[in-house]
Structures are given as C-alpha cells and as structure tokens.
C-alpha cells in the first residue's frame, strides 16, 4: 500500500527548511545548500550587497572555493531592498542551467528574503537584550561603591565583551587639551596602551571632546587616527561617555585588523550603552561623594567633641594637679604629681594630634608634612599592634621644607622598622620638633624616636635625627 501522504517536492522541502533557523549565518548557509541541491549545481555562493550591515560578506558551499565563470545569479530582496545575490555555477550533469532552474531559484530567493528578515529581527533582539543586560550589570556594579579606577575598568571590560572587540579603552581629557588612555581591557596584556595620548590638533579630537561618536573602518589606515597603537587595530567605535552635560571621557572599542566591521545595530546599541554607563558613573560618583561627606561630617563632629570636651577636661585636671603640687610639702608626692602633670600634657598633645588626623580626608594620601608623619606611624601600627605616640612642637607645616621633610620621613621609616624588630617593644614615642637648634646656633628640625624594647641588654632605645632648616 502506498503512503497516503504525498511526498513533499524538493522545492517545498527547501522552502520549509530555509525558515527553520533563526540564526542569520545558519539561515544563509541553508539557502546556499538548498539552491545547489535544487538545481544540481556543484558551486553555490551568496554575496551580500552591504557586508557592514550584518557583518557577513559571502557564504559558499563546501566545494565553491573558486567557482568557474558563467554564473546563474538571482537577487535576494529583503523588505523591498536588495540584500545580496545568489550565484550558481557548474551544473553536475554538464548541461547549462535552464529556465526552470532560474524559476526555482527565484522562488527560493523570495522565501529566503522572508527568512533573512526574520533572522535579522531575531539577531537584533538578542543583541539588544545582551547590551541591556550588560548596561544593567555595569550600573549595579558601579553603584556598589567601586573606586573610580575600578569603575572605569568595569565599563571598559563589559563593553569589550559585548562588542566582541579586541580591546575596551577609556580615554579622558588632559590638561593640555588632548585625550589620554587611562584604562584598557584586552584579551592579552594591554602592554603600553595605557598612557597613549591623542595630542591636541588631531582631526578626531574635536569630535571626541565635543561628545560625538566616531566610527572608523580601519584604525591603521584612517588618517584621523594618530596614536602610536593605531596599527594594531581595524574597525573601531569611539563613543562619548557623556551625562548631564558632563563629558567623562570616551569609550573606544577597536577590533583586530581584518575583523568584520561593526553593523549599524551594533553601533546604535553601543552608543546607548555608553550613555547609560556614563549616567551610572555620574551617579556612582555622586554616591561616593555623599558617603565621603558623611564621613567628613562624622569625623569633624568627633574632632569637635574631643577638642571641646576631652581636651578642656584634661587641661582643667592638669591645672588642679599643678595647683595641688605647689601646695604639697611632701617631696615624694610632689614628684608624683609632677609626673602626672607631664603625662596629662603629653596626653593633651596626643589628643590634638588625633584631632588633626581626623580632619584629614580619609583614604587620601596626605599632602601636609604632619599628615605624612601620621601616615608613617599609622602604617607602623599595623605591624606593631599598637599605635606609636606622636608629638609635634612648633610650626612644622611652615618651617620644614619639602626636601628636609622627605629626608626626615626616610629616617622615621628606618627608625620605626628597627624599633619594630626589637623584642618586647610595647611603646614607641615619635617627636618632631621644629624649634630645635644645632650646636652652631642654626635653626633645625629634630626627629626623636624612643622605644621601650630591649637592645644590647638595655631597656629602651632613643634614635635622634636632625637637619638644619
């Protein structure tokens, strides 16, 4: 008994098969293979009219490396526009292509146009989804409190992955009026990419500083590109990171030489991503500034409390003890009260030093001499397990020049390192006196570092360093 369902014709099978895949490259390959099978051609190829639109130049059958002349060609329309052409050559039976072959090819081309349109829509939707997810991930990462450098790297790396680029690069304006690469994410070692500058006067610089996107077909040959690393790259996008009328910088996404150019869809999505990333950077910066302001206000409040309450009470207690010491006839008690008064004075000085440290911007490298000294003692505290006591005498900020300050800090580091290695050390005292004088009468600054560790059988070591001012 014969099959009750009629067998589908080869053309119908080909038409149905063309529309079964939504991935564009796979759809084009199926069209080429179906055309060769329907017409009996040994060689079939599909060439696109605009390779930049979809990033595909030509699709061939396996044995169509060098098709002979005498091609049968049929255009493929997609939404009323010419997408490309389907070429056939070298019919297996040796006969020429017939009118029926051409008619079959036209039918297949029409159906292929519909399938290509659907595949384009699907691919655009997938790309849009990936870029939206990437922008959301960047926003989430930036708003968790990353440092500025880490935030720029997050943007560069995520954009590189989304764009399938060889590198993700962030450029920022320089004081001289150019732009400089400050962050680079690459598959390999970025090498000397970071620090590369676009000098003032470059043809592309006006567009970048104006916040305009720049699209380059080949970085190595485009006359607008003037950087020393341009020869490494081919197609590139340079996108403004601009938000709230503020230009943060430029996101560059170069591909390797010979890689496919960026499609219009990829360019549009990348521009939108850069805009979203710039807004996230601005929001993250504002969030970071608010957090820092809250820290400043809290530290300022603590400093005021220490100054207005603690120091005043310590000072009043010291006056009481000093008054009692003067009225006390007992020498031992008199001496004890004297030591207590000196200890209170020392404590007041340490509290004042702590107040100064609280008034320094947190997490920033101190720029004042006093702040640099406190930074060194704080670093030693992490190793010692306790914080060295620090005292300043005289106008250290005004009297100690930079060169002398650098030498003193070197001596301080050496003294702290030596003291930390002594056994049983439990107290270190650092004193910086800007009112000292040398034996010849010259003004000087003197650094004294005392520790109570054991050395050569003695308890306690004092190291003194001084320099003329």
Image (cartoon, grey):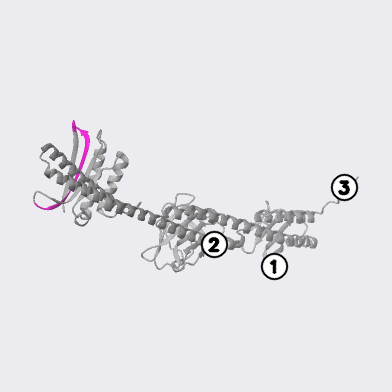
User: Crowding near pointer 3: few (<14 within 10 Å), some, many (20+)?
Assistant: few
State the SS at label 2: helix
User: Crowding near pointer 1: few (<14 within 10 Å), some, many (20+)?
Assistant: few
> Within the magenta stretch, is there residue 464?
no
In this orientation, which residue lies closer to the viewer: 42 or 200? 200
What residue is pinned by disc 3?
A: 3
In this orientation, which residue lies closer to the viewer: 224 or 286? 286
Q: How far apart are marks 2 and 1 (CA)?
A: 28 Å
Q: How far apart are marks 1 and 3 (CA)?
A: 41 Å
Give how far across and how far down residue 61 sits, in percent.
Answer: 68, 53
The disc, 2 or 3, on the residue closer to the chain's N-terminal end is 3
Q: Do the residues labelled 2 and 1 touch (CB within 8 Å)?
A: no
Q: Nearer the viewer, mark 2 or mark 1?
A: 2
Q: Which mark is residue 80?
A: 1
Residue farthest to the right?
A: 1
Task: Tell me the magenta residue range.
Answer: 441-458
The disc, 1 or 3, on the residue closer to the chain's N-terminal end is 3
Give how far across and how far down residue 459 sits, in percent.
Answer: 19, 33
Residue 146 placement, left or right of 381: right
């Amino acid at each position: 008994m014969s099959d009750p369902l009629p067998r589908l014709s080869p053309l119908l099978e080909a038409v149905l098969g063309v529309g079964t895949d939504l991935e564009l490259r796979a759809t084009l390959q199926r069209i080429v293979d179906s055309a060769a099978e329907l017409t009996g051609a040994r060689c079939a190829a599909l060439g696109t009219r605009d390779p930049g639109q979809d990033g595909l130049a030509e699709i061939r059958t396996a044995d169509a490396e060098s098709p002979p002349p005498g091609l049968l060609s049929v255009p493929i329309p997609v939404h009323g526009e010419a997408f490309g052409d389907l070429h056939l050559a070298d019919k297996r039976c040796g006969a020429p292509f017939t009118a029926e072959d051409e008619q079959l090819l036209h039918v297949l081309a029409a159906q292929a146009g519909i399938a290509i349109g659907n595949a384009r829509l699907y691919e655009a939707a997938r790309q849009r989804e990936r870029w939206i997810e990437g922008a959301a991930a960047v926003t989430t990462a930036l708003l968790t409190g990353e440092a500025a450098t880490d935030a720029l790297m997050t943007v560069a790396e995520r954009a590189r992955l989304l764009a399938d680029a060889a590198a993700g690069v962030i450029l920022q304006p320089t004081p001289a009026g150019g732009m400089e690469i400050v962050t680079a994410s690459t598959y390999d070692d970025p090498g000397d990419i970071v620090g590369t500058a676009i000098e003032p006067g470059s043809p592309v610089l006006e567009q970048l500083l104006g916040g305009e996107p720049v699209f380059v077909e080949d970085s190595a040959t485009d006359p607008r590109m003037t950087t020393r690393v341009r020869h490494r790259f081919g197609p590139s996008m340079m996108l403004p990171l601009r938000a709230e009328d503020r230009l943060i910088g430029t996101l560059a996404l170069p591909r390797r030489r010979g890689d496919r150019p960026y499609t219009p869809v990829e360019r549009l999505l990348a521009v939108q991503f850069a805009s979203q990333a710039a807004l996230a950077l601005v929001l993250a910066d504002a969030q970071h500034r608010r957090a820092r302001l809250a820290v400043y206000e809290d530290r300022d409040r603590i400093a005021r409390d220490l100054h207005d309450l603690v120091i005043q009470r310590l000072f009043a207690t010291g006056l009481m003890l000093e008054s009692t010491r003067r009225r006390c006839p007992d020498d031992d008690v008199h001496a004890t009260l004297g030591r207590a008064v000196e200890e209170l004075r020392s404590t007041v000085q340490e509290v004042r030093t702590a107040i100064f440290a609280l008034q320094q911007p947190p997490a920033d490298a101190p720029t004042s001499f006093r702040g640099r000294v406190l930074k060194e003692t704080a670093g030693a505290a992490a190793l010692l397990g306790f914080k060295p006591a620090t005292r300043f005498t005289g106008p250290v900020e005004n009297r100690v020049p930079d060169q002398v300050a650098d030498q003193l800090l070197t001596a301080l580091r050496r003294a702290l390192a030596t003291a930390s290695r002594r056994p049983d050390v439990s107290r270190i005292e650092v004193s910086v006196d800007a009112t000292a004088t040398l034996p010849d009468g010259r003004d000087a600054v003197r650094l004294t570092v005392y520790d109570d560790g054991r050395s050569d059988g003695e308890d306690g070591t004092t190291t003194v360093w001084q320099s003329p001012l």
